[in-house]
Amino acid sequence: MIDEELVQLLTPEGERAANRDYESTLGGDEIFALYRDMVIIRRLCNESTSLQRQGQLALWAPVQGQEAAQIGAGRALAPHDFSFPSYREHGVAWCRGVPPEDMLRVFRAVTTGGWDPQKYRHSVPTVVLGNQTLHAVGYAMGVQRDGAEEAVLTFFGDGASSQGDVLESFVWAASFNAPVVFFCQNNQWGISTPSSVQSKIPLYHRAHGFGFPGVRVDGNDVLAVYEVTKRALEHARVGGGPSLIEAYTYRIGAHTTSDDPTRYRIDAEVEVWKHRDPIERVKSLLVREYKVKKAAFDEVVDEAESLALKLRDDVLAMGRPDPITMFDHAYAAPHPLIEEGRREMIELGISGGVR
Amino acid sequence: MATTTMTMAKALNEGLRRAMEKNAKVLLMGEDIGRLGGVFRITDGLQKDFGEDRVIDAPLAESAIVGTAVGLAIRGYRTVCEIQFDGFVYPAFDQIVSQVAKMHKRSDGVYTMGLVIRLPFQGGIGAIEHHSESPEPYFAQTAGLRVVSCSTPNDAYWMIQQSIEHDDPIIFCEPKSRYWEKGEVDLDEAPCGLFDAQVRRTGSDVTLIGYGSSVKTMLRAAQTAETEETSIEVIDARSVSPLDLDTMARSLEKTGRLVVVQESPHTASIGSEIVAELSQRCFYSLRAPGLRVSGYHVPYPPSRIEDDYRPSVDRILDAVDRVMGFES
């Protein structure tokens, strides 16, 4: 099922893999940092699933299995680049510096956003499939007009790859040679729909039809994802135009906590992918090649544990917003219906009018 | 006061030009708007003067025209999107409703969606299907958007500039049947705020309210009614969302009778909203129930019979007779 053109620099067993186009440029400390990112984001994700199961979140979209794809891509971004996520890119948000508690505000159902997208240069979550890819292309057209050396990275999945907006964004990026990189995490499942229903050809092949390069990378190999994304972003920054990266990976968990994957896929498939775990292979490499000691790994586990506990505390502290905040930022300029709504809420005693 | 006479099409062109001269961040994007100048020539000559980077000939994909304008807004640009015809806006509906309208809120006020979506709307040009629709009620229903419509060259010139300068996203409805009609344009001073209604004719018996192409039809009806000793006040709503209800209520408190005119079907329409709001505000002044003269609840008809679909002087006068004859 994995084709020969898959870019892989680290095998599931943690062995270095030779590739004719790419090689890893990272040293031991940098690889360890990627390992740390992945362990932390998996731990935070598991804590979030627990919080949902305990009734503390309305929903959670787990990232398990896709840590390498997200951390590899997220760390490849330069500080001034801009990223446009869908709703599962917790790993990318982590790389951009978004505080974990901010990632959970949407799922705690206290906001529809959660963080300052300009501060972290990471846009707000986008739930309607594929919408964000057009925003990324438009932003990239702005970068072009500013004459800036910046790139834009946008995320979507194999399911969203069927959306008209994604295909329109391919057309536009190609026509305007926009400095944008399309990052498709092919996690094999769009809720219950297998990726084979979305496309009869490997997804990265689609890029060629639109007139720009496409590459398939082992999405569970953080070293390969990092190098492939980094090169694509550099290519975009210097005027080389768009490209498509298909990160071939797997959604180990459910689509969201509302989903039951046992109804549509077999355990054996999941087991195969568990052997391709993105974290274990990096750990093997770090032990074998860089002689990283158990104590260092334990330290990361401890750090992840304390971050998870902090996340839990932060989430539990998020109370019900004052209802009157629903009127904030509905419009940028004063609007009579906003004033009317606020007034009614105060008159009825629903809100004290505290903003 | 420098005034000059020009068509609405030219006034829009001049308004766009002035906005682009004032602010280098203003871009135009749409299908065939560059070399051709748009199918209605609204952007005629602008690409030549401002370049292909600022007047962007778009590939033919409406969702992308609006979706990339969202990204450009995030980057600090103000894009005026041209949708070629009203009936072609629906591929962009998702981006308009799910993204344009909600981005400011979702980003807690960080993103400013200062973009304008120009929509040649309404019928009356003898076109084929999908070229004569009135989709403005869909957008008026969506919180986060504002919807305006010009009815004169002077308003066209000023309202397009005011819309571009405004920080909320604006659906800018242009009555395409009036593109070629001439009128005085004051180049120095805007007539009023973007969201203000204007009294176009004063009267004492009945208040007529409409927007876009209906304004001229209402004025004709008012002229005819005068010969029958009925005095009609005509209000151009100009802003469809939000509505300038204060101006409308002031008129209704005087006349006590209301007829709303629009080309869209009347179910859940702008006219419905005006009648409901004014019934509430002016209940004790009303001498008759408010009536709506609208398009019928059918798909827009083939244009050979569109004049019997669009509100006509006769249908407006019939409604005027009914409110005048109402005995409480």
Image (spheres, coloured by chain):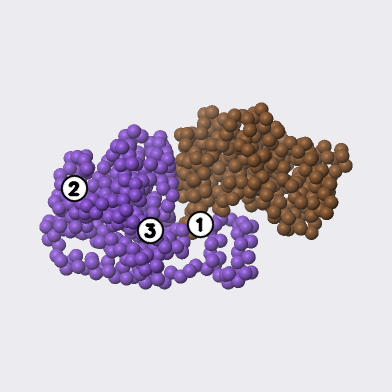
Give whichever of A38, B230 is nearer the camera.
B230
Indicate the chain coloured purple by its letter. Answer: A
Amino acid type, callout 2: Leu
- Residue A77: percent from the left, percent from the top? 32, 51
As rendered, which of A254 and A30 lies closer to the eye?
A: A254
Kind of residue at disc 3: Ser
- Secondary structure at numbered mark 3: loop
Name the residue tied to disc 3: A258
Q: CA distance from mark 3 to mark 2?
A: 35 Å
Q: Which residue is mark 1?
A: B105
Dots 3 and 1 on the same chain: no
Q: Residues within 10 Å of mark 1 (few under 14, many from 20)?
A: many
Q: Amino acid at mark 1?
A: Lys
Query: Can residue A2 be seen at all in this image of the molecule?
Result: yes
Instruction: Write down the colour of chain B.
Output: brown
**Chain containing mark 3:** A
